[in-house]
């Protein structure tokens, strides 16, 4: 089978990455070095040369624009395009996981996603203030804690007498309660909650691990 079309337009290092036999691989590359091209050609290689099922492939990127570009390039390179595989953003991947398995975290499939303004409004209510600047400080701090994997209880335990942090942790506690009651999540939850699913629920983890042999980021 002639697969030269997958390699001819690439430089030596790009060819090495596309045709690598290793299953776990880190490629370090700077801006404009052809990362998207390598990723797309790698996916085409997996299907055309290694006969991998498209259902075993996930390609994840950061922006909707980048994901759309990957889908377009794959459609031009593979007759079947992206049919059967995941080509999406991190947030889209996580939303799908939560829609399907969020019940393990007491989240219904039709949960809503709050934008930044929604979050700010809810935090004002939770903290009993109309001061947007104060609520914004809480928003930044709560986001930081969530990205560190902390919830209100663990954040409160780490405040070490800092009154500002203690106040933010108390607001976070009420905020968490409201989110659950309203069946809502914020953008930090879209990353943090699927992580909790995979870490704490072996059945859910097995469900998502089993079909995906190739995860390309």
Image (tube, rainbow, N blue to C red):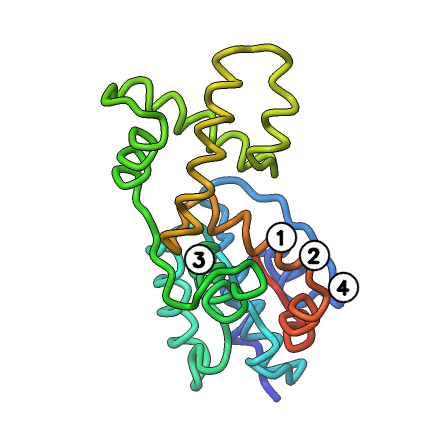
Badge 3 marks a residue whose secondary structure is: strand
- Image quarter of the C terminus: bottom right
Quadrant that contains the N terminus? bottom right
Which mark's residue is nearer the viewer, 3 or 2? 2
Marks 1 and 4 sit apart, C-alpha to C-alpha, by: 29 Å
The residue located at (61%, 52%) in the rendering is 195
Where residue 50 sits in the image (x, y, percent)? Answer: 67, 81
Give how far across and how far down residue 116 sits, in percent. Answer: 30, 38
Upstream in the sequence, badge 1 or badge 4? 4
Residue name at image x 62 percent, y 58 percent = 197
Q: Nearer the viewer, mark 2 or mark 4?
A: 2
Q: Are marks 1 and 2 in contact (CB under 8 Å)?
A: yes
Q: Percent x, y for residue 149?
A: 61, 39
Badge 1 marks a residue whose secondary structure is helix
Disc 1: which residue: 196
Q: Which residue is mark 4?
A: 22
Check disc 3 and report the residue beneath it: 89
Earlier-in-chain disc, 1 versus 3:
3
Q: Name which of mark 3 and mark 2 comes first in the sequence.
A: 3
Could you tell whether 76 is left or right of 9 in the image?
left
Q: Tag 4's secondary structure?
A: loop
Disc 3 to disc 2, how far (Cα)? 23 Å
* Quadrant housing residue 115: top left
């Amino acid at each position: 089978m002639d697969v030269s079309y997958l390699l001819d337009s690439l430089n030596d290092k790009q060819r090495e990455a596309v045709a690598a036999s290793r299953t776990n691989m880190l490629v370090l590359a700077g801006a404009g070095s052809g990362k998207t091209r390598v990723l797309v050609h790698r996916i085409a290689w997996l299907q055309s040369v290694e006969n991998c099922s498209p259902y075993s492939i996930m390609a994840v990127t950061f922006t909707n624009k980048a994901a759309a570009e990957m889908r377009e390039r794959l459609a031009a390179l593979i007759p079947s395009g992206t049919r059967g595989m995941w080509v999406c953003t991190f947030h889209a991947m996580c939303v799908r996981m939560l829609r399907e398995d969020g019940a393990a975290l007491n989240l219904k499939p039709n949960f809503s996603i709050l934008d930044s303004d929604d979050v700010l409004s809810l935090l004002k209510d939770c903290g009993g203030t109309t001061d947007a600047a104060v609520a914004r400080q809480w928003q930044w701090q709560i986001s930081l804690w969530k990205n560190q994997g902390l919830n209100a209880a663990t954040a409160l335990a780490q405040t070490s007498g800092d009154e500002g942090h203690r106040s933010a942790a108390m607001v976070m506690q009420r905020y968490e309660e409201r989110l659950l009651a309203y069946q809502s999540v914020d953008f930090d939850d879209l990353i943090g909650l699927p992580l909790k699913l995979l870490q704490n629920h072996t059945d859910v983890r097995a469900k998502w691990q089993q079909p995906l042999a190739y995860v390309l980021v």
